[in-house]
Image (spheres, grey):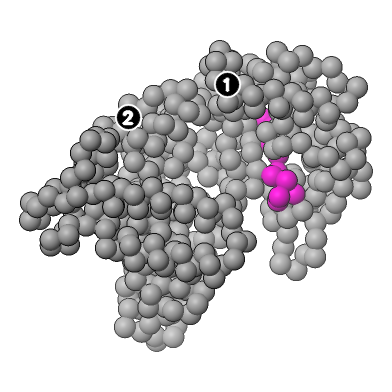
């Protein structure tokens, strides 16, 4: 962890080379500054020509004109057709290809000469990857319709940009909500590690890179590592993702941590309810050894449950408008099975608990919500960095629940103070204020 003197230190702050707002967020977030509409704002200002882009006000619309100008023409002539998010980002980059290049003096000195053409495109890997090559061909068709007769862009140029966007783009978040996609010439220098040196968050579309470890201030960004994806998954799944999406095999320290994987897949001992380990990579081994009593446990049912949980949790996130009564009942049934078969350290049991805490909270069942919240937090504390966003959100949520009960107020304030410190570190000022406001309110009531 970075030392207290490095809290808030910014290693890189960069405006994107190109970025877009997701189509489902198009009317809710400004297409320039990416702020959401204010509570007292009925709606954002709509572009009168394409009727797709939205802005806070005339100032943001004017500032966005250079990037939106060509896009606006294409959207207008498409008469309601909006290409996919990746196609729109690729189009914005193609629109810029004849712009005069100038060094970016806002970047660290060793990155100021870096240009879009310096980014890796993994062209040969994409050509060999049937799934991704089919995606590229589909985007070619989208862009042909989008550009119309005005733009004659070769498939070779599209493939180059497609590869660079696929490998180098960042999802832009606003308060943990994915709102857009951006490409950053400077930040793209950062290679991946599941045990990263730095992390990124966003101030509007601007990416902000800060340290997770001490003593990084004198190092070049090209020598530092960032995580390209969430690390709260076992090594097998992370390596599959790195190879499947980014065409490399990760061999970082976390990927070599066998104990971590054993804990993530751990099951409940049927003899003493202790934690039992088994090697999930050894498909022929259906036995788990209890770390407390040493007994052997058959893991067939536990393995089947974990596969069922993976599918159910993906559906839970991908279909939030599904019948909530049916979904909630299924989650509770899975919880009963997980409680019998999986350890509290199990990653799938933990993620299920984060869903259940919300279900019970919405149902005004605060004791059950707190039980699942505390269970998930304990697991996240074991596996995630203190300032990782998922752990911070869980810490804050637990604190908010605990201060509701006078018998646990002190514990809740401790967690809210911990969350406040973490959000201050990563520059999430709104979250800092929410934690501080709740602490002050509770302390005021206690006085």
For the point 52% across and 64% down, which residue is it?
327
* Dot 1: element: helix
Q: In this view of the protein, which residue sits in the foreground, 194 or 85?
A: 85
Inter-mark Cα distance, 1 to 2: 28 Å
| Disc assigned to residue 252 | 2
- The reply to whether residue 399 is visible in this rendering is no
| Residue 240 quadrant | top left
In the image, which residues are magenta?
17-26
| Residue 269 quadrant | bottom left
Query: 313 left or right of 372?
Result: right
Give the number of the mark in front: 1 or 2. 1
Give yes or no for residue 232 being in the magenta stretch. Answer: no
For the point 91% across and 48% down, which residue is it?
48
Q: In this view of the protein, which residue sits in the foreground, 117 or 421?
A: 117
Q: What is the x, y in percent for residue 434?
A: 52, 67
Q: Which residue is mark 1?
A: 130
For the point 77% across and 53% down, which residue is it?
27
Give yes or no for residue 18 being in the magenta stretch. Answer: yes
- The reply to whether residue 251 is visible in this rendering is yes
| Disc assigned to residue 366 | none
- Mark 1 neighbour density, 10 Å: few (under 14) some (14–19) many (20 or more): few
Query: 20 left or right of 148?
Result: left
Q: What is the x, y in percent for residue 377?
A: 34, 60
Q: How many numbered marks does the figure carry?
A: 2
């Amino acid at each position: 962890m970075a030392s207290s003197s490095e809290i808030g230190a910014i290693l890189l702050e960069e405006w994107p080379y190109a970025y877009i707002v997701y189509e489902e967020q198009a009317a809710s977030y400004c297409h320039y500054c990416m702020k959401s509409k204010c509570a007292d704002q009925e709606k954002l200002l709509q572009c009168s020509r394409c009727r797709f882009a939205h802005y806070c006000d005339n100032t943001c619309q004017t500032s966005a004109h250079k990037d939106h100008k060509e896009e606006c023409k294409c959207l207008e002539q498409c008469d309601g057709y909006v290409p996919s998010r990746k196609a729109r980002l690729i189009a914005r980059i193609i629109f810029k290809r004849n712009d005069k290049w100038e060094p970016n003096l806002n970047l660290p000195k060793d990155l100021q000469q870096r240009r879009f053409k310096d980014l890796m495109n993994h062209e040969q890997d994409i050509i060999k990857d049937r799934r991704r090559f089919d995606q590229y061909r589909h985007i070619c068709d989208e862009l042909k319709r989008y550009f119309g007769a005005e733009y004659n862009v070769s498939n070779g140029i599209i493939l180059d940009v497609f590869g660079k966007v696929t490998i180098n783009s960042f999802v832009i978040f606003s308060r943990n909500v994915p709102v857009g996609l951006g490409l950053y010439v400077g930040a793209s220098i950062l290679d991946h590690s599941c045990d990263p040196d730095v992390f990124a968050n966003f101030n509007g579309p601007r990416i902000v890179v800060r340290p997770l470890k001490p003593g990084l201030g004198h190092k070049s960004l090209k020598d530092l590592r960032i995580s390209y994806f969430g690390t709260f998954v076992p090594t097998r799944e992370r390596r599959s993702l790195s190879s499947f999406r980014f065409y490399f095999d990760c061999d970082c320290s976390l990927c070599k941590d066998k104990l971590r994987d054993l804990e993530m897949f751990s099951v409940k001992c049927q003899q003493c309810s202790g934690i039992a380990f088994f090697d999930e990579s050894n498909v022929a081994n259906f036995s788990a050894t209890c770390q407390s009593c040493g007994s052997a446990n058959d893991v067939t049912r536990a393995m089947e449950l974990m596969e069922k949980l993976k599918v159910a949790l993906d559906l839970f996130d991908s279909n939030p408008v599904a019948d909530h009564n049916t979904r909630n009942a299924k989650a509770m049934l899975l919880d009963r099975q997980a409680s019998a078969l999986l350890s509290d350290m199990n990653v799938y049991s933990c993620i299920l608990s984060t869903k259940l805490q919300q279900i019970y909270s919405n149902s005004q069942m605060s004791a059950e919500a707190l039980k699942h919240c505390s269970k998930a937090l304990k697991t996240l504390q074991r596996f995630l960095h203190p300032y990782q966003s998922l752990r911070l959100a869980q810490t804050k949520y637990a604190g908010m629940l605990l201060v509701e009960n006078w018998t646990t107020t002190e514990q809740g304030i401790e967690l809210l103070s911990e969350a406040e410190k973490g959000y201050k570190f990563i520059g999430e000022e709104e979250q800092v204020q929410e934690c501080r406001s709740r602490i002050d309110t509770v302390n005021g009531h206690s006085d």
